[in-house]
Amino acid sequence: MVDLSKMSTERVNPNTAELSSMSIREAIEVINRENYNAVACIEGQYEMLEKVIHVTSDVLEQGGRIIYMGAGTSGRIGLMDAVECPPTFGVDFNTVIGLIAGGDNAFVKAVEGAEDSQEFAVEDLKKIGLSEKDVVIGLAASGRTPYVIGGLKYAKEIGAKYCAVVCNKDSEIGQICPLTIEAEPGPEVLTGSTRLKAGTTTKLILNMISTISMIRIGKIYKNYMVDVKMSNEKLVTRGTNIVSAVTGCSHEEAKEALAKSGGGVRTAIAMLLLGCGKEEAESALQAVNGRIQSLEKEGQK
């Protein structure tokens, strides 16, 4: 039997020992107080988080992929972050991938026993053609999930990069993976229910990993999503506002540039900054690895 006694995520929280007897207002207040720990616990992991982001951004720069792997809540959080990357950053759907123990159907219905198999993880990574260019990020609140351990071991075996995010100190995963973020939010409001604080902590960390990695490869300029996909009316308006804000042009000029660029926000910005057409703008962007800040300096000369 698995020994869970040393895991803080499995301990009884003394602050919520009488949870079932609390009024609605009391329960709201205690849960929200506990949620602060999900944010605070990340502060002690800044150095490790920085190391992980250096790895993930370098992998993306070299044309590799980020692969999140997890079971249950952790796996679902990885999938959520992965599927948001294409519309937000304009990357291919194969750039950030989420794998969950039991397959995609496990996102809505748990597959019993899947998280206990290291072999399933290897099979899943082979299916997507994991290579030495990629990075696997294992996600496990407990820090001991066999599915995640199997994935990390396989990544190491084939020469891929590998990192992890867990919510317990001195974890089993931390022993086999040098780049493990161990952010510990403490005992859950509901004993052992890591969909709560541990899930929140994991989501916050993945937000930082994906967002900052995309900043480093030029997908964000200042604090604008310059590769946003304008797939609906709201996003068309957002794209127009971004072009206008970055270049200082009118909304009409921004719309015209977007039309000429074929709907590419970053290309439209380059066209306006450099006073050129689409092909020249795309060539200029390619020369600076897509980083608009370099073009802005060029346009100011």
Image (tube, rainbow, N blue to C red):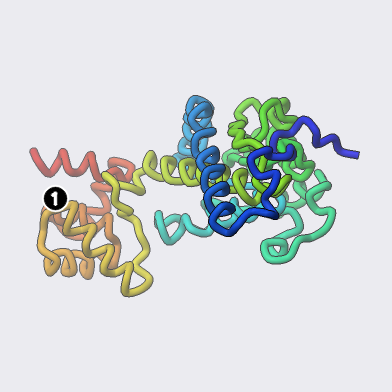
Determine whether 135 is above or below 21 in the image: above
Q: Position of residue 271 (x, y in %)?
A: 18, 56
Q: Quadrant of the N terminus?
A: top right
Q: Residue at position x 21%, y 55% from top?
A: 269
User: In this view of the protein, which residue sits in the foreground, 111 or 250?
Assistant: 111
Tell me the kind of residue under disc 1.
Leu
Which residue is most to the left?
A: 301
Q: Residue at position x 58%, y 41% from top?
A: 134
User: In this view of the protein, which residue sits in the foreground, 261 or 177?
Assistant: 177
User: In this view of the protein, which residue sits in the foreground, 64 or 152?
Assistant: 152
Residue indicated by mark 1: 274
Q: Residue at position x 59%, y 40% from top?
A: 135
Instruction: Locate residue 193 relative to residue 182 in the image: left or right.
Output: right
Q: Position of residue 42 (x, y in %)?
A: 52, 34
Determine whether 167 is above or below 230 in the image: above
Disc 1 on helix, strand or loop? helix
Determine whether 170 is above or below 11 in the image: above
- Which picture quadrant has residue 24? bottom right
**Label 1 crowd (10 A; few <14 / some 14-19 / many >=20):** some
Q: Residue 151: in sight, yes or no?
A: yes
